[in-house]
Amino acid sequence: MSIPFGAHIPFVQHLGFTLEKFEGGESELHYAPRPEHLNSFDVTHGGAVMTFLDVIMATAARSIDPDMGVVTIEMKTTFMRPAKVPEGEKLVGKGHLQHRTRSMAFTEGRIYDADGQLCAVATGTFKYVTRRAAQSPSTD
């Protein structure tokens, strides 16, 4: 059973990420790449992998204060092996908040394939921001 992200993020919905753990500076997300998310080598496109890592780390940062939002300041990604999963399987992403200041979060994210092999690692820095209030629909 997935956990709500707590924010409407259309790109995350489009890619199909699910949030499975969201507590105490830790996050776990799942991602079943679809054929349109693959590159010419038939593995998950690096841009999709980096987006997954960005969301993995952002949710780890937010997990200690879910009412806050975060914006990415920087991230560094290392690709170790192709992020490929058989049909019906998912990549597993795990995030960890390494350190937090009043306004910044320093995080790490890891992606594993269906066999538990490490595919990619990233570190990221995020700025905590006050979440904007949802706008009411226009009545004009």
Image (tube, helix red, strand yellow):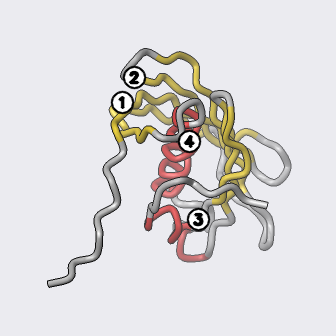
- Identify the element where label 4 is drawn: helix
Looking at the image, which residue sits at the far left?
A: 140
Dot 2: few (<14), some (14–19), or many (≥20) neighbours within 10 Å? some
Q: Position of residue 125 (x, y in %)?
A: 41, 27
Q: Is residue 128 left or right of residue 63?
A: left
Q: Report the number of discs.
A: 4
Q: Which of the two discs, 3 and 1, sits closer to the camera?
A: 1
The amino acid pointed to by label 4 is: Thr
Q: Please identify the quadrant where the C terminus is shown.
A: bottom left
Separation of disc 3 and disc 1 at Cα? 35 Å
Q: Which residue is mark 3?
A: 41
Separation of disc 4 and disc 1 at Cα? 12 Å
Dot 3: few (<14), some (14–19), or many (≥20) neighbours within 10 Å? few
Q: Which residue is mark 2?
A: 104
**Location of residue 129 with respect to 131 vertically, above or below:** above
Looking at the image, which residue sits at the far front?
A: 139
Separation of disc 3 and disc 2 at Cα? 37 Å
Q: Which residue is mark 4?
A: 59
The image quarter in which residue 138 lies: bottom left
Residue drawn at x 51%, y 28% is: 123
Separation of disc 2 and disc 4 at Cα? 14 Å
Q: Which residue is mark 1?
A: 127
Q: Position of residue 76 (x, y in %)?
A: 44, 32
The amino acid pointed to by label 1 is: Lys
Q: Is residue 135 left or right of residue 119?
A: left
Q: Earlier in the sequence, mark 4 or mark 1?
A: 4
Nearest the camera: 91 or 21?
Answer: 21
Nearest the camera: 9 or 79?
Answer: 9
